[in-house]
Image (spheres, rainbow, N blue to C red):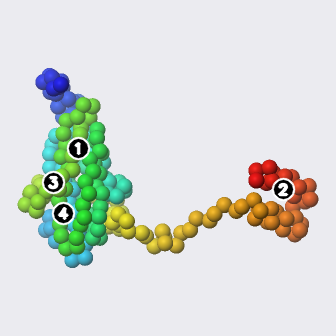
Amino acid sequence: MSVPRFFRMFWVMLLAGILGACATVPMAPQEQDARAKTFNVQPDRAALYIFRNENFGGALLIAVSVNGTTIGQTGPMTYIRLSLKPGKYSISSYGENVSTLSLNVEGGRNYYVWQEIKMGMWSARTMLQEVNENNGRSGVGECKLMATSAGMENLAPLGEQTESSHTATVQPEPTVPEKLRELQKLRNDGVVSEEEYQRKKKQLLENY
């Protein structure tokens, strides 16, 4: 069943103006924007550009995450640039829906993802699409660079374990016999009284 024309126009007007003031996002310095638009990339890194070169839904901020880490909220005519290690990444955009795109990036290459904004039933919908070099550079060129949170350069590819994940261990819950031996030691050392020892021993055995 198609949406009536007047209903569609209502939501266009709502998204364009009734929601209030223009969306604002933190912007990067002008020189950083200019440097990003040279499209230079390190041989051992990949450059990811996520751009939103549309004015539609101008009052709405759309959140973006990479591998589950939120990297910011885009506004109209803005883009994000990330320098990533080679590997697989999952990019998500959050509107009325969630659009997710998987990329397997290689070092020394630029990747361009267009964040398209569409009209939804209650709010703006979003769609992520990888585009080619020509369309990507053209779209990025129309936009201004957003500032991203510190530490975004350290995003690890999916499946890559950090050093802490190798060293961190989960200690198993002591068994009841182990707890009883520890309790007996505390009694023998005079840390707990005989009365406290008997009470704790009874509780442990009841749950055994």
| Residue at screen point 87% across, 61% down | 192
Query: Which disc is residue 29 wearing?
Result: none
The amino acid pointed to by label 4 is Tyr
- Horizontal and vertical percent for residue 60? 25, 40
The amino acid pointed to by label 1 is Thr
Q: Residues within 10 Å of mark 1 (few under 14, many from 20)?
A: many
Q: Is residue 168 visible?
A: yes
Q: Do residues under tags 2 and 4 come within 8 Å of each other at their CB atoms?
A: no
| Disc 1: which residue | 126
From the viewer's perspective, is the residue at label 2 or at label 1 nearer?
A: 2
Q: Earlier in the sequence, mark 2 or mark 4?
A: 4
| Disc 2: which residue | 201
Q: Residues within 10 Å of mark 3 (few under 14, many from 20)?
A: many
Whether 125 is drawn above or below 200: the answer is: above
- Horizontal and vertical percent for residue 118? 18, 39
| Disc 3: which residue | 143
- Disc 3 to disc 4, C-alpha distance: 16 Å
| Residue at screen point 87% across, 64% down | 187
- Disc 2 to disc 4, C-alpha distance: 64 Å
- Disc 2 to disc 1, C-alpha distance: 60 Å
Q: Is residue 98 left or right of residue 127?
A: right
Q: Secondary structure at mark 2?
A: helix
Q: Do residues under tags 2 and 1 come within 8 Å of each other at their CB atoms?
A: no
- Spot the residue most to the right: 194
Frontmost residue, 197 versus 144: 197
Frontmost residue, 102 versus 156: 102
Q: Secondary structure at mark 4?
A: strand
| Disc 4: which residue | 111
Q: Earlier in the sequence, mark 3 or mark 4?
A: 4
